[in-house]
Image: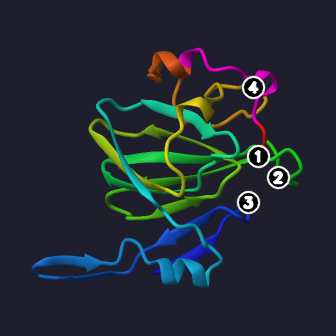
Amino acid sequence: MIVQQLVIPEVKLILPTYFEDYRGYYCESYSKRTLEEHGINDEFIQDNHFFSLKRGTVRGIHFQNNPYAQAKLVRCTKGSMIDVAVDLRKNSPTYKKWVSVILSAENRKQIYIPEGFGHCCISLEDYTEGQYKVNKFYEPKYDRAIAWNDPELAITWGMRDDEIIVSPKDSVAPLLKDSDVNF
């Protein structure tokens, strides 16, 4: 497993090693020991799975406020998506900055997003599936969202606004400046 630092140093790109032969492949998709060697010490306690029926489906920008902030380890198991981590830590030198990676079933990459970050993604093709681990359980009282199209964040989605599909929850999410983010 290779772990690479991205432009925002706390966010990591993870490339599992695949062993392939005529039967298919084998890989360790998660190794606590390897991640700890690279400074990722979260204990992941829940796995989540999502499916986007259509290309252009946006999920996020989602996070949980403290004390239930979540770290995530995200991968795409079918199709492809742009996955984005947004730094929401007010005292961080990279506050309001974001980093994105293309995750796909083909490239097999993963992204580690630490606590204090918002998470969002957009499906690049129909029938895209993603899975992610979290280090804290879902707590509805602390669940938050920020507008996917917040001009202050200016995330590049790679699609026109009229191609983007959002949930009712995400369509009414506040701008960052109006949110109660507490990182």
Q: Is residue 60 magenta?
A: no
Q: Are marks 2 and 1 in contact (CB under 8 Å)?
A: yes
Report helix, strand or loop for mark 4: loop
Q: Nearer the viewer, residue 32 or 139?
A: 139
Horizontal and vertical percent position of residue 172? 59, 14
**Could you tell me which secondary element the residue under label 1 belongs to?**
loop
What residue does disc 1 label?
97
At mark 2, the secondary structure is loop
- Magenta residues, start to end: 171-181
Q: Indicate the amino acid at tag 3.
A: Ile
Reading the chain from its start, which is encountered first: label 1 or label 4? 1
Residue 161 visible in the snapshot: no
Q: Name the element at disc 3.
A: loop
Q: Are marks 3 and 1 in contact (CB under 8 Å)?
A: yes
Distance CA(mark 2)–CA(mark 1): 5 Å
Structural distance between the alpha carbons of marks 2 and 3: 7 Å
Specify whether 38 is left or right of 110: right
Quarter of the rendering containing residue 108: bottom left
Q: Residue at the spot x=32%, y=57% of the render?
A: 105
- According to the picture, the residue beneath numbered tag 3 turns out to be 8
State the mark number for residue 179.
4
Q: Which mark is residue 168?
A: none
**Viewer-proximal residue, 161 or 70?**
70
The reply to whether dot 3 and dot 4 touch (C-beta < 8 Å) is no
At label 4, the amino acid type is: Ser
Q: CA distance from mark 3 to mark 4?
A: 22 Å
Q: Position of residue 78 (x, y in %)?
A: 28, 50
Q: Of residues 122 and 132, which is closer to you in this image? A: 132
Q: CA distance from mark 1 to mark 4?
A: 16 Å
Q: How far apart are labels 2 and 4 at the CA level?
A: 18 Å
